[in-house]
Each structure stands twice: as C-alpha cells, then as structure tokens.
Amino acid sequence: MSKMVIEDGKFVELTYKVIDKKTKEVLSEVEFPLGYIQGISEVLSSEVTAELVGQEQGDVIELPIHCDEIYGPRDESLVFTDHIDNVPEEYRKIGMSVTMENEAGEPKDFIVTRVDASSVTVDGNNPMCGREVVFILQVVTVREPTDEEASAGGPIKDTPVFDMPNTRKIH
C-alpha cells in the first residue's frame, strides 16, 4: 500500500514550531497535533499549507518565510505613544495586549512595547511583522477524512458530554 500524500481533501495533522532566523529563538510552538482538511479548513496561512502538498506522514519540512508575505509590511501608523496618566495601570506592562476600536468600531489588538516614567507605547502590528522565520512542520497524519469531518470541513472536537437536564444543543 502506498503512503498517502497531502493533497486537497485529505485530513492532515501536524505539529510545528516557528523559529526566528536571526535570533534562532522559538517564537511559537504547537505540541498537540493540529488537524485540518487540506484546501478546506486550513489552520495555517495558505503560503505554508501550499508547501505541504505532496508530503507524507512522518515528513519534516523546513520552510523559510518572510512574515511580511503573510502579515504585510510594518505600518508605523499603528504605533502610538500616550502619556502614562492616560493609560490604566493594568496596561502599563510590556507585552500586555490592549484591544482598541477604530472609527468604524472594529476591534484591533495592540501590544504594549515600551513603558517609561512618562509614557506608554503600543503597537498594532503583528509581532511577527518584518521577521524572517523558519516554520518547521512535522506531518503526523495524512488520511481520508471521515464523513463527519468532511461535512464539518475539519476535525471533530472531542467535547465532554454533560448529562444535565434543561440543556440543549445550540447548533
């Protein structure tokens, strides 16, 4: 029996880590396999999943990517500095995430990048902007999706069953 390769419609599970090319630091890592159906419910950007086509279970792929291709170039207009007195105390820590709304009322996350005695700076750019990274992907599973997965367009989550009166499914 020949090994199954990743192609549209196949159920795939993978783990990955993202490493900064310059600093060699691991920026993010997924230890529990992420499941998706290739071409339907992709969990990673299309730039990444396109490179998985033709790979088999057990393969490890190193994929260099410039994050500007995924997130766009840095936009300095998304960097704001405000007087520290205008910023609530809980947001005066580097790395805090602050959700703000634009004029249209759409939420956007900003990360606190600088705090000094008089000001706080927040940045709305994706923290990966401008970085060159290497995705190291390990293909854990390649198979045909079950009928349930195919109709859901992705993995079926194992949800605990609670035997409680007065509960009903909402979808």
Image (cartoon, grey):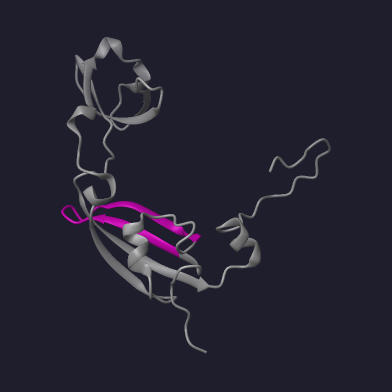
Is 35 magenta? The answer is: yes
On screen, residue 164 versus residue 148, left or right, reads right
Task: Give percent across and percent down for residue 47.
Answer: 31, 58
- Is residue 114 visible in the rendered image? The answer is no
Is 33 magenta? The answer is: yes
User: Does 76 appear above or below 54?
Assistant: above
Q: Residue at x 19, y 45 (%)?
A: 130
Extent of the magenta region? 14-36
| Residue closest to the eye, 93 or 12 | 12
Q: How many marks?
A: 0
On screen, residue 155 versus residue 84, left or right, reads right
Q: Residue at x 43, y 72 (%)?
A: 6
Task: Give percent across and percent down for residue 37.
Answer: 50, 63
Residue found at the very far right of the displayed protein: 165
Task: Give percent across and percent down for residue 161.
Answer: 73, 49
Residue found at the very far left of the displayed protein: 22
User: Does 171 appear above or below 53?
Assistant: above
- Is residue 37 visible in the rendered image? The answer is yes
Q: Residue at x 49, y 72 (%)?
A: 142
Task: Give percent across and percent down for residue 54.
Answer: 38, 75
Image quadrant in which the C terminus is located = top right
